[in-house]
Amino acid sequence: MLLARLDAAVAVALNHWGAGASTAGPLLAWLVGADLVKTLPFLLLLVAAWHWAPLPRYRLVVVQGVLGALLAMVLGRLLPLVLPYRARPLRDAELGLLLPPGVAPAALDGWTSFPSDHGLLCGALVGAVFALHRRLGWLALGFAAVVVWLPRLVLGYHYATDIVAGALLGLGCAWLAQRPAARARAGQPLLALAARRPAGFHALAFLLLVQLAQLFGPLRTGLGLAWMALR
């Protein structure tokens, strides 16, 4: 299949480039695990936009942007349950990928490669930034491509189509979240709640942003351990 061959060729080319650069491999390996580095710029921008004037317009965009990111995360958990399993490039011995110290072929064992959950989340966050400001949106897209998606391609965590599909789905989630019907049914009631109960709203918003910054890793780990304990 042409697309599969193209995926393999891109994976090998990027991996060998990263392995040949003296500092690129270790740096990219660090970026893969640095969740805060990958998500915090987006979330800081959303927090800043919450205070932009006119407040009602930008606050509605921010709320819907966060809801779009949450939708993307939900899709990232549900799609692997219904789509065929796809092994990650680093687990394909035929590709002969070169992995830097600290990255093992068994990394993310059991997790399907398609679609990329990082593609989904950052695609949704990029879409939220585009809804706020088009020029900032292009900067956000460049940041996601270089800091979030490129390391996962170089290290063999994903094929290019995993990232592209995830990013497009994430952008789709952001687009849906910004539709007038979604704003009327979700964003506007949430803004009304923020006006009535500002303390509780901002406390819960802080908790939600912390979880988004960590891709809900602590919450998923805790729920997984609780499920194992109850079985």
Image (tube, grey):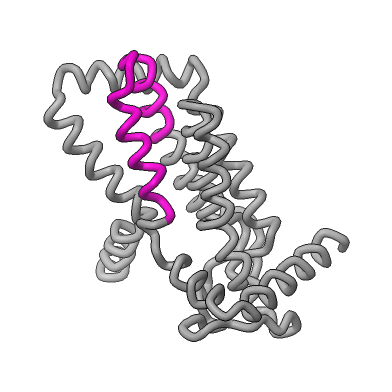
Residue 44 place in picture, x, y as percent: 33, 41
Q: Is residue 3 above or below residue 133?
A: below
Quarter of the view holding residue 93: bottom right
Number of numbered markers: 0
Is residue 146 positioned above or below 133 on the image?
below
- Measuring from the top left, give residue 76's x and y in whole percent: 51, 51
Tell which of 96 and 1 is nearer to you.
96
User: For this view, does 213 lie left or right of residue 120?
Assistant: left
Q: Is residue 174 visible?
A: no
Examine the structure image and report whether residue 29 is included in the region drawn in magenta.
no
Of 136 and 59, the residue lying toward us: 136
Q: Which residues are magenta?
A: 38-66
Identify the residue at image location x=52%, y=31%.
130
Query: What residue do we see at 58% from left, 52% from top?
Result: 145
Residue 56, x across and y down, in percent:
33, 14
Q: Is residue 123 visible?
A: yes
Q: Quadrant of the N terminus?
A: bottom right
Residue in the picture at 62% in, 65% down: 153
Q: Quadrant of residue 198?
A: top left
Q: Is residue 65 left or right of residue 152?
A: left
- As drawn, 89 above or below 138: below
Q: Which secondary structure is most common in the magenta stretch?
A: helix
Q: Is residue 9 above or below residue 36?
A: below
- Horizontal side of 63 relative to 93 (left or right) equals left
Q: Position of residue 109 (x, y in %)?
A: 52, 76
